[in-house]
Amino acid sequence: MLYAILCYHDEKVVGSWSKEEDDAVMARLDAVHRRVREQGKLGPAARLLPTTAATTLLKNRDLVIDGPFAETKEQLLGFYVIDVSGLEEALEIARDLTRANPGGAYELRPISLFLPGSGTT
């Protein structure tokens, strides 16, 4: 079963890290990434640029605005796609990621694979 792990954190906190602090967090996360990848469970993962680089399309008004639409303290900073047996295994991986990078939140969502034109949904 595919799950997305959405990574939320306070951008001001993450943005205030020194290069050394950021490198240390990335090294701890890399240890988790390597283990999950070796198990064949890690799919695409991305670290998003800050919300200052974001553009939002408000669908109901066809209005394009700079920045994120959500006005919250924590922002979506990145995501993982994992292939696991179910929610419990997804939570185990999210807990490992939390130990490597505390603070913020991880939101786990099952993925319904959508491949246009393939007949797969």
Image: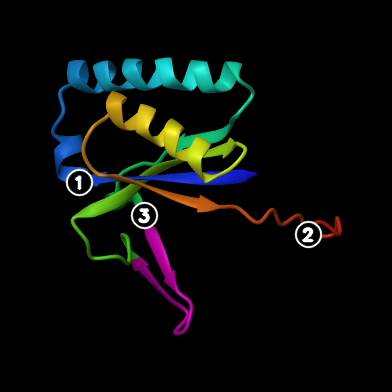
Residue 74, given in percent of the width and then of the height, sits at: 23, 52
**Image quarter hosting the N terminus:** top right
The answer to which of marks 2 and 3 sits earlier in the sequence is 3
Q: Nearer the viewer, mark 3 or mark 1?
A: 1
| Residue type (three-letter) at the residue carrying disc 3 | Ala
Which residue position is annotated with label 2?
116
CA separation in Å, label 3 and label 1: 16 Å
The answer to which of marks 3 and 1 sits earlier in the sequence is 1
The answer to which of marks 2 and 1 sits earlier in the sequence is 1
Q: What stretch is highlighted in magenta?
A: 55-65
Q: How crowded is mark 1: few (under 14 residues within 10 Å), some or many (20 or more)?
A: some
Which residue position is annotated with label 1?
10
Q: How crowded is mark 2: few (under 14 residues within 10 Å), some or many (20 or more)?
A: few
Left or right? Give the position of 60 relative to 110.
left
Which residue position is annotated with label 3?
54
Pointers 2 and 3 in contact (C-beta within 8 Å): no
| Residue type (three-letter) at the residue carrying disc 1 | Asp
| Residue type (three-letter) at the residue carrying disc 2 | Pro
Q: How many callouts does the rendering have?
A: 3
Q: Is mark 2 on a helix, strand or loop?
A: loop
Q: What element carries label 3?
A: loop
CA separation in Å, label 2 and label 3: 26 Å
Left or right? Give the position of 20 relative to 111.
left
- Which residue is more in the foreground, 71 or 54? 71
User: Residue 7: within the magenta?
Assistant: no
Residue 111, given in percent of the width and then of the height, sits at: 60, 53
Residue 15, given in percent of the width and then of the height, sits at: 19, 36
